[in-house]
Image: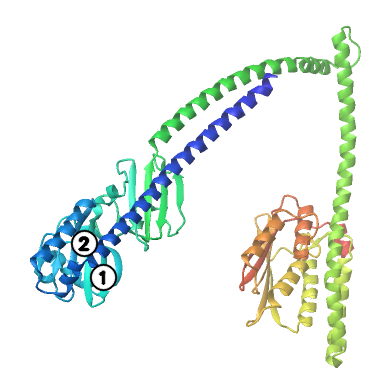
Amino acid sequence: MALIFIPVILCITLSVFLYAERTIEAEFSSINLTNTRSAAEEMKKLTRKMRFITASLLLDDNARAFFTDSDVFEGTERALNGQITSYLNTYEGIESIYLYSPLTGQVLTGLTYYKSTTAAANIRWLNDFQMASGMLLTPRIQEEGYPYVLTAIRRLNEYGYDGVAVVNISLNAIASMLGVQEDDAHSFYILNEAGEVLYRKNKQALLEDAARFSDLRHFEKTQEDKTLLDRTESRAFVWSQVYNETTGLYFVEKTYMTEYTERMSMLQGLIFSSAMILLAMFLCVAAYLTCNALRPLRHLERVLDQGEIVGGKHPQDEYTRYLTQRIMAQIQSNAHFREMLTDQLILLEKTQLRSLRSQINPHFLFNTLNAISMQVAGGEDGQSRAIAMIGWLSELLRYSLAKTDSVPLSMEILQTRNYLNLLLARYDQEFTVELSVAPGLDGCLVPRLLLQPLIENAVFHGVVPLEGRQGRIQIQIDRRDNSLCVVVEDNGIGMSAETLEQLRTQLAHLPEEMPEKHIGLLNVAIRLHLMYPASPPVSVESAADAYTRFTLLIPLESPDPAAASEDA
């Protein structure tokens, strides 16, 4: 009973550990993703603020007077300065606000009034955006203060007015404005739609390539939210990515899970201690039960060694004698049954091999006879070819009806040439055939009609449907270690990746029933498996509109003189 409960307790403990681990991971991932979404939403709100500030400034009556009149009244300037200053004081993180008149060249910064953009170095960049319309959100480099800013530019060019409002936000303060925590355990990034880093802590350029940073190796240009747990570094971390459609920006947050590591270490210690205790209990119980179970077996072993199958004085000897007789009878019965089963399996394999071989014969017979009938109707030349085809066919049929399953390679090559002659005559030399056999292999045994299904597959599914180039079939037979290597390749239409994967699956796991496609090839594969169970499966390689290659490895065997004389 203890042996039953110990594995159960161990399984429960492991299940609790795995469930706790998944729960903790899901909790940290959810928190990190929520924080990243919150930063994206805050950026969206910040964009709305910038849109509001630029729109309200452009629609102000004082601003319109500033845009059209080169001589601004002191009251107008004071009112605009006060409005800009109120925005700067109200919205934390805004570094500066500009009003620019393309008509007069005047710039008002909220603190200083310039007659022309060329009068101050920090506003010369405005000339590059004079043609902008609507609101533009762009990063740029300024010449004073922190160099990297995020600038919102909005232009009003209607109703006789032409003016530009500019709001600058320091990229150095963007994280705090979005409520993002940055320390040794937290990293935060903002990327534009091109995948360039717009913000990171201690940035060194306006736009940086994301590929430079290991923290961004999981980044993808996708609008779907993404979060994952990464344990590849010394400390596990959660990585989240969020895309905001309004701003067109990606937000990435990486958080090292110090608390997660502590929790997992505690759980690992607990499960290890529990496992050791349970293992010790299991070994003690197992040792006790094993000793009790082996005691009568050892006694039985001594009785069998002493030959005391009958006789004996003690009741224990009687019981041992009874067990011995039952065991001996069972062994003899099993031996007889094993011999019968082996004979039946051998007979079944022979029957299955002959059945498979008989499936090949009718496969090409009808088409060949039809081709012969067409040759007979084609005049004297056709009739002479028909006579030759009948001769080749009769030899091939006589060869296929023989009783032996294995034949010398030379005989298989001879009948393969007959089969190729039939195909070339039928298709009027639409393709070429190259047959190469390494020296010294003529006497090796191979399954009868091994090559015919492979050639048939290459012809009908490879070179016949081919258009635009000459079909070619290559047959190469050589020695590879202690095996005979047979390669049949064509330059036909090939197979798609999906069809190739399906065929490889069928060859690796041979079906009990023949499918509708690749009957000949699977027939050969099943025969090879029955005749040579230890040989590797048929290998197939293919590329669409390029080639198909079948490779077979057959153990090298010498011919049986009696079988060879029968085939001859």
**x and y percent of residue 1 in the render?**
70, 19
Q: Which residue is mark 1?
A: 155
Callout 1: SS: strand
User: Does residue 214 appear in this view?
Assistant: no
The one of 507 and 187 positioned closer to us in this rendering? 187
Q: Is residue 272 left or right of residue 176?
A: right
Callout 2: SS: strand
**Residue located at (83% from left, 69% from top):** 363
Type of the residue with mark 1: Arg
**x and y percent of residue 216 in the render?**
38, 52
Residue 481 in the image: above or below residue 473? above
**x and y percent of residue 215 in the render?**
36, 50
Residue 296 in the image: above or below residue 361? above
Q: Which residue is mark 2?
A: 141
**x and y percent of residue 82 in the render?**
15, 58
Closer to viewer: mark 2 or mark 1: 1
Q: Is residue 179 left or right of residue 511?
A: left
Type of the residue with mark 2: Ile
